[in-house]
Amino acid sequence: MQTDIDPRSLIGRKAFDRKGTKIGTVDEVYLDDATGVPEWAAVRTGLFTRDAFVPLEPSEFVDGSLHIPFDRALIKDAPDFGVGRHLSPEQELQLYRHYGLDAAPSGGVGPDRDFGRLAGHEE
């Protein structure tokens, strides 16, 4: 995904799966603690359903909406960690495995590395 996008601009945007089917609305964006780059989005998949975590890389922000290159079923089956909290390294690794992605896209995962800081929240 483009790294120059303000993560706050993603919140409230529609999200679509790889077939162009709407899956929901971006509820929150999580930043990599080491780089500050947007890494995950929590997408509200329905009025009374939970948020699903989706990777922002390799997703694309096109014409004001987030396009996620995975099927809707895979997205809806993503591990549920709740939203509004920091993602632990173990939780993030579970998400990478769920989507079949490389678990160390930004140069490695060390035991002291924190993941998934919520955009707009300073700790």
Image (cartoon, grey):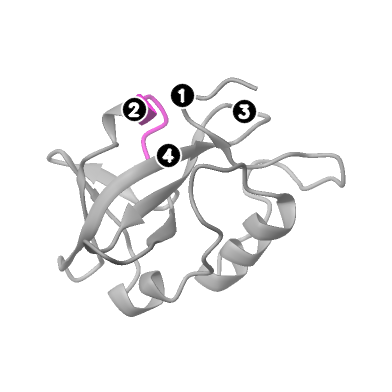
User: Which picture quadrant has residue 101?
Assistant: bottom right
SS for callout 4: strand
| On-image quarter of the C terminus | top right
In the rendered structure, the answer to whether residue 110 lies left or right of residue 55 reads right
Determine the secondary structure under disc 3.
loop
Circle 4 Cα neighbour tier, 10 Å, few/some/many (<14 / 14–19 / ≥20): many
Q: Are marks 3 and 2 in contact (CB under 8 Å)?
A: no
State the mark number for residue 120: 1
Identify which residue, 77 or 97, lies in the foreground: 77
**Of labels 3 and 2, the one closer to you:** 2
Which residue appears at 23% of the width and 64% of the height?
46
Q: Earlier in the sequence, mark 4 or mark 1?
A: 4
Residue, x 37% and y 72% (percent of image)? 76
From mark 4 to mark 3, how far is it between C-alphas?
14 Å
Callout 1 crowding tier (Cα within 10 Å): few <14, some 14–19, many ≥20: few
Residue 33 is situated, as x and y percent measured from the top left of the image, at 65, 32
Residue indicated by mark 3: 35
Residue lying farthest to the right in this orientation = 111
Percent position of residue 83, x then y: 48, 49
3D distance between C-alphas at marks 1 and 2? 8 Å
Q: Is residue 117 shown in magenta? A: no
Residue under pointer 4? 29
Identified by mark 3, the residue type is Thr
Q: Which residues are magenta?
A: 1-7
Q: Report the Cα–Cα distance between label 4 and label 1.
A: 9 Å
Q: Contact (CB < 8 A) between labels 4 and 3? A: no
Distance in Å between CA atoms under marks 2 and 4 = 7 Å
